[in-house]
Image (cartoon, helix red, strand yellow):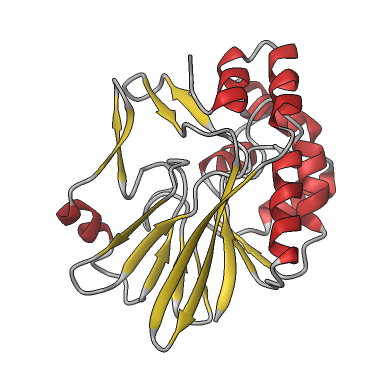
């Protein structure tokens, strides 16, 4: 079993193009996509055009996808409103067909945040001063208590991370394809610094009953996307896309 896993594209079509090219170059056929496809001030429509073409991609929805589907346009915020405006009806239909969680080949569990919520962090705890910190193992294991899978995937924090649980199961966050840092003013005014303006994803392969996990960081024209964010007045986005840091 060998596949790529991606997450948190957030409308960054150039980052997605770079990642898809790298995946194809490595002869990987199957892709697991953990959601938050479009939310943000970038190129949601172009990103949607790429995603609807993918025949070997299993995709679930994240919190921003759910918000775009569940709330009227006038209640959407500065991330989801501009993205929703760019989506065609066929894009919305594609998004509406994505589930909140999924299981791949009976062995791999997919969620966006934690198994029971798309808006909470599984392995990371927001730290108001430095971004994200690793949660205690007991807290990470508690979220996996009702799951019987050797591999569990999540996104949402945008931080590449792998944790091995006490019983040998793994939880993996492939990082963010297209959003290299963000500020969250809703729940504690924290920032998440990725520290690198590259498109992140992961390759997983099961060999002889053991998981081999490779994290990838793919360069792309991140400054072009930073300029789009800057031109629309999203300076936090522009900073994160330029450098991986919220300044």
Report x, y in % for residue 118. 44, 47
In which quarter of the view is residue 43 placed? top right
Report x, y in % for residue 126. 31, 32
Instruction: Answer yes or no: is residue 77 visible.
Output: no
Vertically, is 139 above or below 84?
A: below
Q: Quadrant of the N terminus?
A: bottom right
For this rendering, which residue is in front, 214 or 237? 214
Q: Residue furthest bottom?
A: 208
Report x, y in % for residue 222. 69, 31
Q: Determine whether, in the image, residue 221 is placed left or right of residue 30.
A: right
For this rendering, which residue is in front, 98 or 157? 157
Please tell me which residue is depicted at 71% across the width and 31% down the height of the picture.
Answer: 83
Please tell me which residue is depicted at 71% across the width and 39% down the height of the picture.
Answer: 220
Give the mark count: 0
Please tell me which residue is depicted at 37% across the width and 53% down the height of the picture.
Answer: 114
Vertically, is 36 above or below 171?
A: above
Report x, y in % for residue 162. 36, 57
Instruction: Answer yes or no: is residue 167 visible.
Output: yes
Vertically, is 105 above or below 87?
A: below
Please tell me which residue is depicted at 36% across the width and 76% down the height of the picture.
Answer: 149
Q: Determine whether, in the image, residue 162 is placed left or right of residue 44.
A: left
Q: Determine whether, in the image, residue 156 is placed left or right of residue 27.
A: left
């Amino acid at each position: 079993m060998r596949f790529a896993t991606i997450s948190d594209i957030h409308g960054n079509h150039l980052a997605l193009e770079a990642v898809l090219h790298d995946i194809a170059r490595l002869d990987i056929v199957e892709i697991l996509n953990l959601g938050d496809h479009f939310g943000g001030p970038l190129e949601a429509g172009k990103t949607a055009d790429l995603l609807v073409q993918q025949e070997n991609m299993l995709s679930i929805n994240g919190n921003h996808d759910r918000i775009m589907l569940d709330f009227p346009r006038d209640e959407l915020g500065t991330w989801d409103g501009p993205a929703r405006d760019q989506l065609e009806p066929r894009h919305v239909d594609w998004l509406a067909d994505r589930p909140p969680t999924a299981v791949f080949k009976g062995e791999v569990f997919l969620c966006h945040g934690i198994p029971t919520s798309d808006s909470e962090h599984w392995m990371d705890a927001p730290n108001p001063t430095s971004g994200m910190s690793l949660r205690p193992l007991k807290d990470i294991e508690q979220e996996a208590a009702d799951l019987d899978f050797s591999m569990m995937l999540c996104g949402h924090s945008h931080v590449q991370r792998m944790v091995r649980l006490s019983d040998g199961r793994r939880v993996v966050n492939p990082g963010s394809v297209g959003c290299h840092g963000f500020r969250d003013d809703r729940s504690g005014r924290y920032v998440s610094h990725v520290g690198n303006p590259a498109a992140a994803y992961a390759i997983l392969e099961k060999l002889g009953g053991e998981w081999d996990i490779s994290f990838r960081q793919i360069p792309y024209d991140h400054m072009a996307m930073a300029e789009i964010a800057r031109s629309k007045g999203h300076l936090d986005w522009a900073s994160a896309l330029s450098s991986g840091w919220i300044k």
